[in-house]
Amino acid sequence: MPNWAITVWRRKQSSSSPVDAPAGPFALVASDRGVRKLYAVDAAATALGLYPGQKAPDAMALVPELVSAEADPVGDLAALDALVDWCVRFSPAVAADPSDGLFLDITGVAHLWGGEAAMLDDLLARLAAAGIAARGAVAGSAGASSALARTGPDRSVVENGEEAAAVATLPVTALRLEPGAAAQLARLGLARIGQLAALPRDQLARRFGPATLTRLDQALGRGEEALTFRRPATPWFDRLAFAEPISAPEDLARVSRDIAEALCRRLETEGRGAGRFELCFHRLDGRGERLAIGLSLPGRRADAIARLFAPMLETVDPGFGIDAVTLAADRVEVLDQRQAQLDSLGEVELEEGVAPLVDRLTNRLGEERVWRAEAYPSHIPERAVARRPPLTVRSGADWRVDRPRPVRLFRRPEPIDATAPIPDDPPVQFRWRGQLRRVRRAEGPERLAEEWWRRPPGETEPGHVRDYYRVEDETGARYWIFRAGLYSAGVPAKWWLHGLFG
Amino acid sequence: MSSRQTRLASLRAEIAALETLSQPVGEVLPFGDARVDGRLPGGGLALGRWHEFAGEGLELETAAAGAAFAARLAAPLTGRGALVWVLRRDDLHAPGLAGLGFPADRLIQVCARDEAEALAVLEDALRTPGVAAVFGEVEAVSLTAGRRLQLACESGSATGFILRRRPFGGRDRGDGTGSAAATRWSIASAPSQPATDEPGLGPPRWRVSLERCRGGRTGGWLMEAWEDDDAPHSLRVVAELGDHRLAPEAEFKLAG
């Protein structure tokens, strides 16, 4: 997007005041190490010979009628971020290319628009309608598409493998080089990417730095580039666009079912299922209303997925209307290779009964409220249990049943007033929740020391031990109590109640 | 037989039919002891129904004895399908359940935010095919909620074990006499007795009283945990209690 900073500024102006944008030459100015310099210039100013990086007083002297405003690089980045969010309607994998570009990974989604060129046209037309001047290109590598979009013919679509030919005539400045390397190339008269590509690689790396070589490879489609995508690229993505915006709740329910059916049909034909679905309603004003559901077992039943989304639809604010809906599937895996998690359950019961139950509960109550306990190798009672999502494959860790453990364990041990006449003996009576309980029988102690490896060195001390006793009172109720620390004369021992046996 | 007696007999039959909700008792889970099974219709704990377990005093807040008893009672069902435990306070300790022979790592635990949600989750779980046993900790089950649970049991194949538990510091909301449960049990811990005069604790014991039983008779027993591979579950009857309210006194004197 050429002149992104100015586009953003204009959009801000037009939304805050209806006054027309200045018609004459316009520039944004920023301070660079105490020097006022032009940060961005519009087309009129460019025509008058102004360029970004020019000193502001010089520019004012050359073009006295220049209108200027303070640049806001942070705001520009934020606006780019917002645009990234908006572009999710085209592909879930969108990455910002600061300071003025966007990458869309359209692997596997272009067919929804009827081809790459049609998709690019649609994207640019929508941007233009929003008042954003943009150029675009489709290529097999991020580097090539970036170079083509910035300096090549507008809306060029390059087939895979033809990147080198397509970028050969482009200027080297399109390569996103470091300033030093770019200046050196200019001094040597290397203006075109094709000239650079013809040079021996080892010399190139030595003279212009390895970064230059990397950039060149990326543009030629020879090197990989790691982009920070908002979401990973997925071919498991579908989209429905509407001629007329929709907003009625029953319409939302209907389109969520339709799009789920479309995506699930594709999953079905490839024998796959997904564990997570993200539905996004794209509003006319560019905002996206997102909903996500998770499945405990990867699935592809459109009606079940639509049913999980149904209760969330009422939270969707359609604004002035919704013109597109997208559905992306995540955690896609081959269904046939799944192992049966619950050995006593038949496949049918699991898929028809328990898995949908877990999904309903997880999506209604939240993931942290539905779990399965698993043994965790720690002797500290409160750490001996790990929570896992239900229906996950069991790790095979066994519970240690050689030591009795209570059925109820309090998250925080409760302090008790205990009378223990003999040190290192269980108490003869204690008071818990206002009631005095006489200990009739007791077992113990089981000494549990703290996990010294979990503390910073030097902070461990022998006092951090707990002596656990299993005691039974006159009514037969059984308690798990412990004394904190070792016995030392003169210091009253601190007793706690940690759990109850049934 | 006089006409009065005939009428009485027919009325009794009618009441019995009403009490069993006009369905024959299907599969049962026997205790393996005629003293208990003889009082339950069909000779055991009816499956595909829901059963209520309550305690008294602090036990009504902690539901520890009830949880241990229900877990032991349901152990034979655990191989039949999924297990769900619906909680309001997540203080259920899986290693403790595992120690009772309960497959704690297969148990799906659900922590509900309030009473209504707990009942809704219970209903949903009971209705689900493939679920063998559903445990629930709720404050009280009203008549309507009880009927809903019963209908859910009938459309699924699960057996419900409902533990009455009130929030800490909360007040008892009555005993829910109009319950739709198939049976209602009162569980209290009882002093254990080691085999000989060994130090330490004996196997845990419970004072179990069947307070309400559709189509059966009430009763009271002293039960003990009992590890025996041949028994249907790890509970055995130590003694039948004539009046379960007087029994603990006698038991305590015996224990000295």
Image (cartoon, coloured by chain):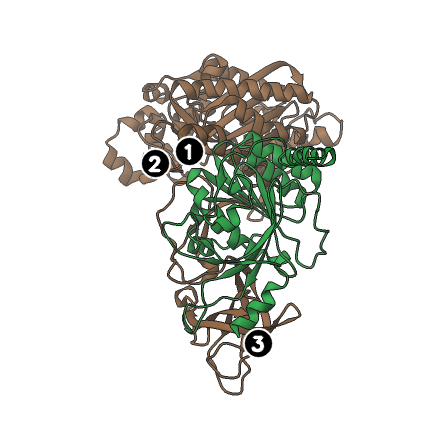
Q: Nearer the viewer, residue B79 or B122?
A: B79
Q: Nearer the viewer, mark 3 or mark 1?
A: 3
Q: Nearer the viewer, residue B157 or A279?
A: B157
Q: Position of residue B71 (x, y in %)?
A: 49, 50
Q: CA distance from mark 3 to mark 1?
A: 78 Å
Query: Most extreme residue toward the right, as rendered?
Result: A18
Q: Amino acid at mark 1?
A: Arg
Name the N-terminal-most of marks 3 and 2.
Answer: 2
Name the N-terminal-most of marks 3 and 1.
Answer: 1
Q: Position of residue B69 (x, y in %)?
A: 52, 53
Residue B8 horizontal side relative to residue A104, left or right? right
Name the N-terminal-most of marks 2 and 1.
Answer: 1
Residue A105's image quarter? top left
Q: Amino acid at mark 3?
A: Gln
Which residue occupies 45% across, 30% down? Answer: A349
Count of marks overlaid on the render: 3
Q: Which chain is represented by brown in the image?
A: A
- Circles 3 and 2, Cβ within 8 Å, touching? The answer is no
Circle 1 sits on which residue? A176
SS at circle 2: helix
Circle 2 sits on which residue? A212
Res A429 label: 3
**Up-down relation of residue B152 to residue A492 (above or below):** above
Q: Position of residue A290 (x, y in %)?
A: 59, 31
SS at circle 3: strand
Chain label for disc 3: A
Q: Are marks 2 and 1 on the same chain?
A: yes
Q: Which chain is represented by green in the image?
A: B
Would you call the spot at circle 1 few (<14 residues within 10 Å), some (14-19), or many (20 or more)?
Answer: some
